[in-house]
Image (spheres, grey):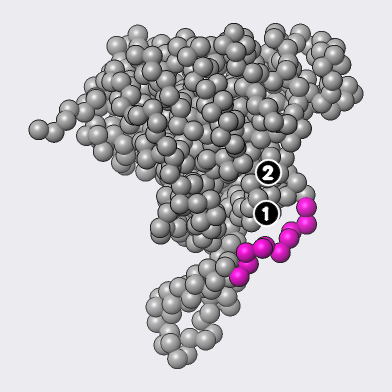
Amino acid sequence: MEPRPPFGKILIANRGEIALRVQRTCRDLGIQTVAVYSDPDRNALHVRYAHAAYALGGAAPRDSYLRADKILDIARRSGAQAVHPGFGFLAENAEFARAVADAGLVFIGPPAPAMRAMGDKLEARAHMLAAGVPVVPGTSAPVAGAADAARAAAAMGYPVMLKAAAGGGGKGIRIVRRAAEMDSAFATAAGESASAFGDGRLYLEKFLERPRHVEIQVLADAGGRVLHLGERECSIQRRHQKLIEEAPAAWLDADTRTRMGAAAVAAARAVGYRSAGTVEFLWSDGRFYFLEMNTRLQVEHAITEEIYGVDLVEQMIRVAAGEPLGLPEDLAPQGHAIEVRLNAEDPDRGFAPSLGRLRNLRLPGGPGVRIDSAAYSGMEVTPYYDSMLGKLITWGPDRELARRRMLRALAELHVGGVVTSAGVALRALRSGEFRRADYDTGTLERLLQAPREHPPDLPDDLETVAAIAAALHRQHVAVRGVPPATAAGASPWVSLGRRRAFDQRAPRGA
C-alpha cells in the first residue's frame, strides 16, 4: 500500500524557480499543486507545471504576488489545504502566516510569533543575548536620527554600519567610516528601508573589517526537536547580496563548527522555531557573531541538500503536516557543493538589471551538475521581479572537483539577449583567494577593481573551450549542410562573431 501524502493539494504563493522547485518535491510526494501568476508570468514554467493555475492579475508585486487577499481567495476556491510561500514576497510576513492559519489552512513555514521575533532585527538581537548567542556589538534600540547615530558611533568607534531594523536582502544598509558621512548615509538608509519595508527605523552595529559570512541550516519540528545541517559559506557577495555559496566551509575548524551549530540551535529554540530556517553569522578575528535569522527557505538551500542528501522542501512539508523530523542526529555531510546564482544583471554597470528576451539559452549538464531554474528561451526578463534567472549547483567528493565542475558548467552555459553575472562568477572561482578558501565579504569588490589576471587553470579551461568549439562547429556544419571537407570557413570562431563561449552579451540583431 502506498503511503498517504502529507497533503492532497498545496498552493505555492510564489513564482519562477522556487515555485518550480516546490512543485517538483510535491510531485515526488504525490501532492497536487496550485500555481498563482501575474500578467507577465502567464506563460511561465511554474504555471505550466502546476496541476491548476490561477491569475492574480497585475504586474508589479504589490498588485500580484503581495496580494495576500487574492492568494487566500484562490486557496479557498482551489481546494488547497496548505500554502508554501517559497522565498521572497510573503515568505517572512508574519501577518500572512497568521491569515493563512485563520483561513483554516496550513502555513508551510514557521509560526507567526517566531517570524515576528526574528523579522525585527532589534528584537532578534535581544532574544539572542538572552539565549547566550554572541551578537555584533551595536545599539539595542533604534537611533533617533543622524545626530544620535553619530554619538553612538563615536562611542563605539568607526567604522560602523547603519542597518534597517526590518527586512533584509541587503536593503537599508550603509557603511559609515567617518563622522562626516553620517548625515548622508542615514538619510539614504532610512529612505531605502522605508521604501522597501514600510519601516524607516535604523540601528547601529560595529562594522567588522573583512568578515566571513557563514550561515547554519536548521530544521525544527512541532515536538521541539531542533537540529542543524551544517554551514554554508556565503562571503562572495555584491551589494550585501550573495553570488557564490559553498558547503561546507573549507576553512572552518571542528571546534568552531560545533560551537556555531550549537548557537544556531539555541537561536531557533529561543523563539520557538518550527520548519526550515537559517541562522546567519559573521566570523572575524577568530570569533563569530549572530547576524540575523531568515525564517524561510534560503536560495542556497540546494548545496546543503547535495551534501546531506536531504530534501529540505519535503522536510518543511512533513513538519507542517505535524510529522516529527525523521533525520538522525549524527547525519554527516558527504563531499562538497558550490552554488552560483545566475542573475540577469551587468557587472560593468554596477550590477544593474539587464532586461530583455532570453535567446539561445543553453544550460549545462553532466556529472555533478544540478540546475535550479525556471528560465527558458523566449522568456522575457522584466523589471518587476528579482534578477535571478536560476542557480547552478555542482557537487564533488572534494572541493576542487566541485570547483572544476562549476568552471565546466559556466563554460557550457550560454544566455543570449541579456547580460548575466556568469562572467564575474567565473572570475571569482578562478581567483587565488577562492582557490585557497581565503576570502571574505570584500573579495568580489577587490576582484572587480583589480586588473584581470591570467587564470591559473587556463590549460584545463582551454581544453573545455576547445571541446565546446568542436561541438559548435559540428552543429554549424550539420545545420548549414556544409560538407566536412569544405567546412574550414564554417568555424564558429569565425562565423559567430562576438558570440563566444564565455560572452554573455548577445550580438547586435540577435
User: From this viewpoint, is residue 414 visible?
Assistant: no
Secondary structure of residue under mark 1: loop
* Residue density around tag 2, few if under 14, some if 14–19, many if 20 or more, within 10 Å: many
Task: Inspect the image, locate mark 2, and give the three-letter code of the amino acid beneath it.
Answer: Tyr
Figure check: 244 above or below 201: below
In the displayed structure, does residue 325 sit left or right of residue 305? left
- The quarter of the picture where the C terminus appears is bottom right
Magenta stretch?
Answer: 450-459
Closer-to-camera residue (388/53): 388
Work out which residue is located at the far left of the displayed protein and give it.
1
Q: Quadrant of residue 443?
A: top right
Identity of the residue drawn at 73% across and 31% down: 285
Do labels 1 and 2 touch, CB within 8 Å? yes
- At horizontal 41% and vertical 59% (from top left) the residue drawn is 366
Establish if 190 lies above or below 398.
above
Residue extending farthest to the bottom is 485
Image x and y of residue 109, in percent: 40, 21
Q: Kindly report the distance in space between the C-alpha atoms of the residues bearing marks 1 and 2.
A: 10 Å
160 left or right of 265 in image: right
Residue 245 in the image: x percent, y percent? 56, 42
Tell me where residue 459 appears, x and y as whole percent: 61, 70
Q: Is residue 97 above or below residue 509?
A: above
| Residue picked out by circle 1 | 431
What type is the residue that disc 1 sits on? Ser
Where, quadrant-wise, is the N terminus in this rendering?
A: top left
Question: Mark 2 = which residue?
Answer: 439
Q: Position of residue 228 (x, y in %)?
A: 46, 27
The front one of 349 and 260 is 260
- Counting labels gives 2
* Residue 381 numbered mark, or none: none
Dot 2: element: loop
